[in-house]
Image (cartoon, rainbow, N blue to C red):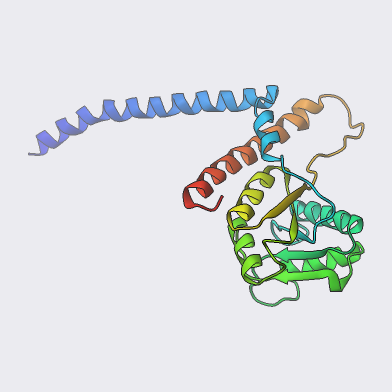
Amino acid sequence: MDTQITLNTRRQRPKMLERLRNLFFWFGVFSFLFVLSAFTKAYQPVAEWLAVAEYSDKCDYIVLLPAGPIPNITTLGRTYQTALEAQKNPSAKVIISNKLEGRYIGSTLWTIKVELMLRGVPRESILLEKQARSTNEHAKYIKETKMGDYKKDSYLLVTSPSHVKRSVLAFKAAGFAHVYASAASESYGWEDIGEGLFIRYKMWNRLVEQVFVLREVAAIVFYKIRGWA
């Protein structure tokens, strides 16, 4: 009996090793293509598609979609962009949509509201939606809490470039008739910090950009399957 088990184990080892070799081979191929794409920016057309949406600076509501509490760099960028849009359209109400957990003071909602006020957005212009945890829930709860007339009023979504497409699709799927978007810039200026910028910085930034692009494409597919986009 023990001999039979030993023989079976020995037969299985070559198959396991073959599977591991295949796994590492395809992982290597994927990694090579991933790095190659960073050099060539082959992902750029998809990134641009994700960032495309109609824009209007005459919307009734400006909706800030957070990505965590300040000083999160992504949320800071979106907050800055929201303040710019509010300056262009002072009559618009600004909605911050994010689930409130625990105390209000020090929460994501509170830090963003304070930052907007520091940038000149009047306190009375800021509305808080306190239940949403995801993109589809932003649309769901803004609609359910009746922050405006989702069929008649216009909404300008402020989010990151890679998140624009999914956000607009989610709001339209929820029934919002007039949805626009403003992408918060995630590009950075370059000072003179010596040679070799591509290897030192740009290539790695592009690798991160590709991760965001892949994530958003996967998320859009998931949203389509669930009927959220």
Residue 59 placement, left or right of 107: right
- How many marks do you count on the picture? 0
Farthest-out residue, left: 1
Residue 84: x and y in percent read: 88, 54
- 197, above or below 185, in the image: above
51 left or right of 76?
A: left
- Relative placement, left or right, of 115 versus 170 is right
For the N terminus, the quadrant is top left
Residue at image coords 53%, 49%: 223
Within the image, what quadrant is residue 139 found in? bottom right
Is 159 left or right of 137, judged from the image as shown?
right
- Looking at the picture, tell me which residue is in the foreground, 147 or 161: 147
Out of 140 and 134, give the one closest to the viewer. 140
Looking at the image, which residue is at 63% across and 73% down?
101
Estimate the x, y position of residue 18 in percent, counting from the top left. Answer: 33, 25
Seen at 65% across and 76% down, the residue is 102
Q: Quadrant of residue 135?
A: bottom right
The location of residue 126, given as percent across then percent down, is 81, 69
Residue 15 lies, in percent from the top left, at 27, 27
Q: Residue at x 48, y 29 (%)?
A: 27
Q: Is residue 155 above or below residue 2?
A: below
Residue at the farthest front position: 152
In this rendered view, identify the residue nearer to me: 223 or 187. Answer: 223
Residue situated in front as seen by the camera: 166 or 6: 166
